[in-house]
Amino acid sequence: MESISHLFKEFSYRPRKSQGQNFLTDTPILDSIERAIACPPGDVLLEVGGGYGALTERLAKKGAPLTVVEPDHKLFAMLERKYGKASGIHLVKADILKLDLAPLAPAQPARLTLAGNIPYYLTTPLITRLLTQYASILRKIYLMVQREVADRLAAKPGTKAYGALTLCAQYYSLPKKILDVPAGCFRPRPKVDSAFIELEMKTAFSLSGDSEKRFFTLVRAIFQSRRKMLSNSLKSLGRPFEKVQEALAKTGIDPQIRGEQLGIGKLIELSTALE
C-alpha cells in the first residue's frame, strides 16, 4: 500500500475536517479488522467510503466480488488508479445516503456484507437507512463508529446510552463491539476515540408493515420526552386515554415508569396492545 502522505501529495489532497475525513492508518488495527470481517461464499462485499484504499486492499483479499462506494472525486481518483481495471472490483462514485443498494445485491440466498470507515456525522442516518430499508439484502454491517455510538447500539434499558438508535439496531440486528480504536490510529487525529462494530442482521422480525411503523412511532414518542412518565409520553400518539390505560394494564406496565426503562420485547408488546 502506498503511503498516505505520498498519495495525498500526488493528488494535491488535504483531508477536510468539515467532511469528517479521518483516515485509519494503523496497520495492526487494519489487520484486526481484516480478520474480523467474514464474508461467506456467494456474498458480495460492499465497502462504504473507500477513502485512499487502506481497507479496500484488505477486502480485495477476501475473494468475494467487491463494490466500493466513494463520493469524493480526488479519493475516487486514487481508488480508480489502483483498482479501476482490477477484476472483481467495482468502483461507484456516489453518496451512500442516496444510492440504491438493491441493484448491488446478489441473488438470494446470498446477501451483501457491508464494511466501512465513514465520517461520524453520517453514522446515525446511515445505520438507520441500512436497517430500515435494506435489512432483507444485508447479512452483516461492519462499521467504524464513535465509541459513544458503539455504546448506544448495545445499551441496556435504563442507561443513559439507551435510546431510539439502540432500539432500531436491536430490532433489526445483533450489535457487537469488535474492538476499541484510539484516536491516534487516524490521520488527521479525531477528537474522539472510536470502535469497530458488527451488526449481524436478524432473519425474522417481530412485526411487519404498519405494525412495524407504529412500533417505531411509539419509540420516537418515548425518547422525545424520555424523562416523562410513560403515560404522559404516550399522549403524543393521539390515542384515547382509556385505550392507553387499557394497553398498559394488559401488558402489566406501570403507567408511572419511564419508557426508557422498558426493553425492546416489552415495547413491542405495548405497541401491539395499543393496536
Image (tube, rainbow, N blue to C red):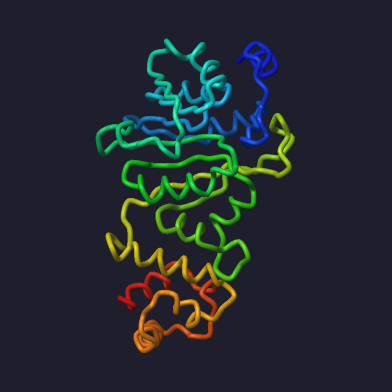
How many numbered callouts? 0
Does 249 appear above or below 16? below
Picture residue at 63% right of the left edge, 37% below the top: 20
- Which residue: 51% across, 57% down? 165
The reply to whether residue 33 is visible in this rendering is yes
The percent coordinates of residue 182 (x first, y second) are 71, 40
Which of 80 and 224 lies nearest the eye of the viewer? 224
Query: Is residue 28 among what the camera can see?
Result: no
Residue 90 place in picture, x, y as percent: 40, 21
Q: Up-down: is 241 above or below 148? A: below
Q: Which quadrant would residue 189 be assigned to in this image? A: top right
**Quarter placement of the N terminus:** top right
- Looking at the rendering, in which quadrant would you find the C terminus? bottom left
Q: Residue at x 39, y 48 (%)?
A: 201
- Image position, residue 58 (x, y; %): 52, 24
Looking at the rendering, which quadrant does residue 121 occupy? top right
Measured as percent of width and height from the top left, residue 177 is found at 57, 48
